[in-house]
Image (cartoon, grey):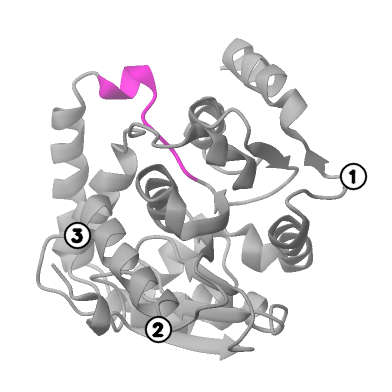
Amino acid sequence: MLDANELFYEEEGIGESETIIFLHPKVMGSWVWKYQRRFFKGYDCIYLDLPNHGHSKCDDTFSIKNATEVIKDFILIKTKPKFKWDKVNLVGIGTGGLIAFELLCDYPELLDKVVVSGVSTPLPEMLENREDAMVNIFDYSKYFYENKTMRFIASSHMAIYGISKRNSSNMKFSLENISPDTVKDAGYEAMNYIIPPVKDSGKGKDLLLAYGSKDERVVTYSSYEFHKAFPLATCIRIDKGLHMWNMLMSDLFNEIVYDFIKEGKIKDYDNVIKEENIGWVFFVWLILD
């Protein structure tokens, strides 16, 4: 397992202020937070590459559990010298969000506010015969990566996530610095994530769960499941939001994250449906599916 001291990160902002650690989705890197770097200058911000991604080189198999332990150790290293701030804030999307959620379940004492977006847990029907389905997906994934140019693969991922062409060089770098095995392992982990036992459900008051209306349908279902694990959490639906809404709707993303970390709540927005309506949204989704 990667040593926490070997984890690649960039630190920006005011060193004596609260710390925010940003955790990116699978197959990408810390570059996805480019629009957050400009906004959160008043905080001590850490943008890291997940284990097995980008500059965080690792020969071990990628797993959410291993990544969680590495980042837990990293948090301990970063907070020990800071006697003023003994906790950190986390912001994660996709696999980064799953790791942030796992940390909240296992190590709530290390965390202040946690913002998670675009996370998923398997639908009941996805658990049936999933091994065969995974084998087919991974066989295709291996073929896909061995028989396509990096430019084509980068363009495909950007189209799926809604990332603009001006980030093509960043996407290409991420794909050139990740192994096919990590791509498969990270995909399997994300598609098969099971919500773990919660150590302190009261910590849900410090959790913001978000998902975009244009993200995958399983993410809509999952928001309801993650919310059940932490009933005190704030849960919001972003109208017309895609998986990477931190880049595509960066102003809204930044304001929501800033409000939640600072105040523990968010203001009213025309294109944001708050938690009291999430159960109804889930019910309508089941009817229409």
Q: Residue at x 64, y 63 (%)?
A: 246
Which comes before the other along the chain, label 2 or label 3?
2
Q: Residue at x 33, y 83 (%)?
A: 8
Q: Residue at x 63, y 32 (%)?
A: 232
Question: Residue 177: x and y, percent?
Answer: 26, 79
**Label 2, label 1: how far apart the Cα atoms are:** 35 Å
Type of residue at label 1? Asp
Judged by depth in the image, the label closer to the viewer, 2 or 3, is: 2
- Is 76 rendered above or below residue 91? below
- Residue 89 on the magenta span: no
Residue 208: in sight, yes or no?
no
Q: How many marks overall?
A: 3
Name the image quarter holding the N terminus. bottom left
Q: In what element is the residue under mark 3? A: loop
Badge 3 density bin: few <14, some 14–19, many ≥20, Cα 10 Å: many
The boundaries of the magenta stretch are: 119-127
Near-viewer residue (163 or 274): 274
Question: Residue 98: x and y, percent?
Answer: 41, 49
Q: Residue at x 21, y 57 (%)?
A: 66
Which comes before the other along the chain, label 3 or label 1?
3
Near-viewer residue (113 or 277): 113
Q: In what element is the residue under mark 2? A: strand
Residues at badges 2 and 3 in contact (C-beta under 8 Å)? no
- Quick check: 244 left or right of 186? right
Residue 62's disc number:
3
The residue where tag 1 is placed is: 270
The residue where tag 2 is placed is: 9
Type of residue at label 2? Tyr
